[in-house]
Amino acid sequence: MRVFRALTLVFSLSICSLWALTPVFAQLIVAISVDVAPPPLPVYVQPSIPAPGYLWVPGYWVWDDDVGYYWVPGTWVLPPEPELLWTPGYWGWDDGYYVFHQGYWGPHIGFYGGVVYGFGYDGVGYEGGYWRNDAFFYNRTVNNISNVSITNVYSKTVIINNKTNVSFSGGAGGTTVKPTPEQLAIAQEHHVGATADQTRHAHEAAKDPALSLANNHGHPTVAATMRAAQFKGPGVIAAQPGQPIAAVSPKGHSKEIREQRGPAGTGITTTTPGTNPSMRERKGPAGTGITTTTPGTNPNMRERKGPAGTGITTTTPGTNTGQEIRAHIGNAGGTNTGPGSKPQSQKIQSSVTRPPMQPMTRAAPPPPPRQPQPSGKPKCQPGQKCG
């Protein structure tokens, strides 16, 4: 059961990868938000790079409904294509819950909550290197590249003012960095999801009991690895010892969030809460006029229409679980669809909203043909006088 629930994040990473390959279709992301703050980031050194061309992906905490938080080690990975950089995922405070925002590959580094992951990720941007003519140039002051012959290197000092290793943005004790207009624009660029190696890496971490906070107390023995999904042997780095961090019982601390993303480039996002009964309204990018209201306790059907000419109509139900969420997107040739998380939960189906059918009535039969009536006077015969 633990592995099944822990693979929620892995499923999300896989869907991100598929979405990048088929940008005209909608994307469904199932994530877990938690009312318990993630632990501080463990302190560790970076393992050496396995070969030229690899980029560093920092480690992060993930929530599992059976064991609580567990650690996904940092590792070196090959980017899906040249000229792409990795924007790390991060935990962000949102109305009483901590929600994990997925990382992604893109031409620029976006917002990652101001979390200082180290090794070039100092909370804003990336100082670990840059691309030029399909070749990556490494900053050797923050990358461990001493064991490999790499000619594309330079030195730039990176000063990091961080003593708490906080791993989340917003809320009590979180970072206070806000996204800049440039970072908001980067969020609308075309992005590529996690690679197959990253997905496999997260999958293996979910199955390793030693990586759970309850067992490692915030200082995992596998804090970073040279190669993805290899948690034993050379290239495995343990976290530095420190003050033990207590783990809470995982039961009753999470809720499911189903995020429905429209076709690439539209900027349409619909977030549907699971166990949280409150109504949640999410607005689309500035200037689009797209607003989506997700169901809570209000039993009335609510319909919101997008900007004129887009053909976007979203209808959301109230408490009646037998009703369906029907969404039709007419401007991109695709339709948002996504299954519910439980048999009793809401269903999301793709269809055009139709008006209710009127009861059929049978037409009355036509009246029978009228028969001619006999005259009251007798008919005169030839040669007779009829009066």
Image (tube, grey):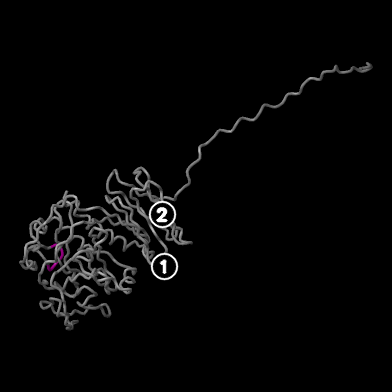
* SS type, badge 1: loop
Please indicate whether residue 90 sits to the left or right of residue 372 in the image: left
Which of these two is toward me, 248 or 383?
A: 248
Where does the image place residue 15, in percent across and percent down from the top left? Answer: 28, 58
Please indicate whether residue 369 sits to the left or right of residue 126 in the image: right
User: What's the magenta bit mostly, secondary-structure-wise?
Assistant: strand
In the image, residue 145 sits, relative to residue 74, either above or below, namely below
| Disc nearer the start of the sequence (2/1) | 1
Q: Quadrant of residue 75?
A: bottom left
Where does the image place residue 373, in percent across and percent down from the top left? Answer: 77, 21
Residue 314 got which mark? 2
Q: Are marks 2 and 1 in contact (CB under 8 Å)?
A: no
Q: Quadrant of residue 155?
A: bottom left
Where does the image place residue 59, in percent across and percent down from the top left? Answer: 16, 66
Name the residue that disc number 1 marks: 287
Which of these two is toward me, 282 or 87?
A: 282
Q: Quadrant of residue 384?
A: top right
Q: How many neighbours does mark 1 have within 10 angstroms: few (below 14), some (14-19), or many (20 or more)?
A: few
Please indicate whether residue 345 sits to the left or right of residue 175 in the image: right
In the image, residue 383 sits, relative to residue 281, either above or below, namely above
Q: How many neighbours does mark 2 have within 10 angstroms: few (below 14), some (14-19), or many (20 or more)?
A: many
Where does the image place residue 251, in percent across and percent down from the top left? Answer: 17, 50
Report the amino acid beneath label 1: Gly
Which of these two is toward me, 309 or 132?
A: 309
Q: Which residues are magenta?
A: 225-229
Question: Residue drawn 56% across and 33% down?
Answer: 362
Position of the C terminus by quadrant: top right
* SS type, badge 2: strand
